[in-house]
Image: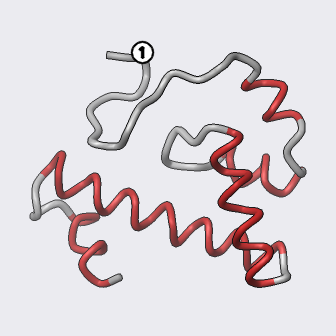
Amino acid sequence: MPANLGTTTLRRKRHRSGAMRDYDRLPAELRAWLSTAVLPWRPGSVRQAYDRARARTGDPVQALAELDRLQERLVAKDASAVWGPAHPHASQGAKR
């Protein structure tokens, strides 16, 4: 199992190196969001989700709020599979 991912049902893939370079190329507000993210996002994945959200909303603040909601859904989905439906985050996934 990879070093710091722990138990998760989320997909894992091998990726090319250069993650730090990709991280450094992210906009400052996205790097700040990523530094507090709950999930181990790849810079390319978070950039793609952010770009989509920003194109929909036209506002970087609303795009970051969409990333928060996306992350909550992913955590809720994973929480029910890993810790069972009684876990507090698992019930949040059913509400969305």
Residue 87 place in picture, x, y as percent: 17, 60
What is the number of callouts on the image? 1
Q: Is residue 84 above or below residue 35?
A: below
Say left or right for 55 vs 3.
Answer: right
Residue under label 1: 3
Q: Residue at x 76, y 20 (%)?
A: 18
Relative to 79, 3 lies left or right? right
Q: Relative to the observer, which residue lies in front, 88 or 60?
A: 60
Q: Amino acid at mark 1?
A: Ala
Above or below, 58 relative to 5: below
Corner quadrant of residue 85: bottom left
Q: In this rendering, would 5 be left or right of 79?
A: right
* Residue depicted at x 84% and y 57%: 29
**What is the basis of the colouring in this image?**
secondary structure
Question: Which one is nearer the viewer's eye here, 49 or 6?
Answer: 49
Along the line of sight, which residue is nearer the eye, 9 or 40?
Answer: 9
Q: Would you identify the image quadrant in which residue 50 lies?
A: bottom right
**Residue at (74% x, 82% y) in the render:** 56
Residue ID at (51%, 67%): 70
The quadrant of the picture occupied by the N terminus is top left
Residue 9: x and y, percent?
Answer: 27, 42
Residue 19 image offset from top left, x and y in percent: 72, 25
Look at the numbered disc 1 and give the secondary structure of its residue.
loop
* Residue 55, percent from left and from top: 79, 76
Q: Quadrant of the C terminus?
A: bottom left
Dot 1, how many residues are within 10 Å of its Cα: few (below 14), some (14-19), or many (20+)?
A: few
Above or below, 75 against 16 in this view is below
Residue 75 sits in which quadrant? bottom left
In this view, 81 is above or below 11: below
